[in-house]
Image: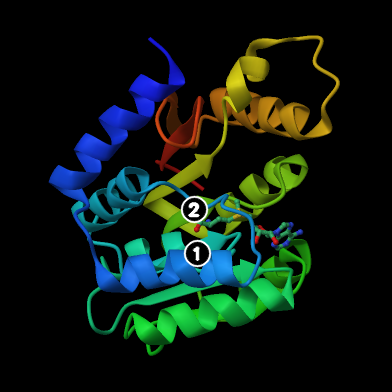
Amino acid sequence: MNPEQWSSVDQYFDGLFAPPDAVLEAALAATTEAGLPSINVSPTQGKLLHVLAKAHNVRKILEIGTLAGYSSIWLGRALPADGKLITLEIDPKHAAVARANIVRAGLDEQVEVIIGKAIESLPRLDSSSAGPFDLVFIDADKVSTPDYLTWAMRLTKPGSLIIIDNVVRKGEVADPKVTDVNVQGVQKALAMLAADQRVIATAIQTVGSKGYDGFSLAYVVGT
Ligand SMILES: C[S@@+](CC[C@H](N)C(=O)[O-])C[C@H]1O[C@@H](n2cnc3c(N)ncnc32)[C@H](O)[C@@H]1O
């Protein structure tokens, strides 16, 4: 197996499960045109988020890490008409591209982009009536993942789902001597989940057009 095979299988899956979609393609084109990095989830990963959100009948979603709103659109499309997705983004340029993409997707009534450091926006959400959230998707600066997980636990309720992206990091996550603070952040968050009696959690490796990485999924049973 090699990365070329992973990508060609992803293209095959995309053709079946995430076929050409003008809104999503325009969102990716706007990402590139604005010079933003291509660090969004892949189409099939976006579809996975959509399926999980649908299966879970989510009404309120919190996303930490917007970029250009690609995953926000996949998640937002799973919401009912009166549902809400709040997505947190530190970079105003990213947020501006995301807002335009979200308007183009017809989701601007349901999706709100909040600009600022997530670690500062999260306490404000906690003291507002925004939560509790049915689903939290953590996909921002990896070093802060343990802090985001702590906030996700505060902002969810039994029955909620917490999804963390990029938990494999090309396999480095299994290296106990790793010095990269981003990988260490992921290791700490996974250890927190494993030890937390308030969740039922797992992690899964993925390969494909985004290389070798993975997700962690946690079902909240207590708070
Ligand atoms: C991996 S990208 C998000 C990709 C997006 N979820 C998708 O799949 O389409 C991570 C985003 O988190 C943002 N970010 C990084 N540090 C942050 C912070 N401290 N607070 C909020 N957002 C942050 C980055 O600017 C970037 O846009």
Q: Which residue sits at x=64%, y=24%?
A: 191
Q: Which residue sits at x=28%, y=84%?
A: 82
Q: Quadrant of residue 76?
A: bottom left
Q: Which residue sits at x=27%, y=28%?
A: 9
Label 1 CB less than 8 angstroms from ligand 1: no
Q: Position of residue 46 (x, y in %)?
A: 35, 51
Q: Quadrant of residue 187?
A: top right
Q: Secondary structure at mark 1?
A: strand
Q: Which residue sits at x=64%, y=63%?
A: 36
The residue under label 2 is: 137
Residue 132 seen in render: no
Q: Secondary structure at mark 2?
A: strand
Which amino acid lies under the numbered mark 1 shown in the image of this protein? Leu
The residue under label 1 is: 62
With respect to residue 178, does 50 lie above or below? below
The picture quadrant for ligand 1 comes to: bottom right
Which amino acid lies under the numbered mark 2 shown in the image of this protein? Phe
Q: Position of residue 176 (x, y in %)?
A: 75, 9
Residue 140 seen in render: yes
> Is label 2 in contact with label 1 (beta carbons under 8 Å)?
yes
Q: CA distance from mark 2 to mark 1?
A: 6 Å
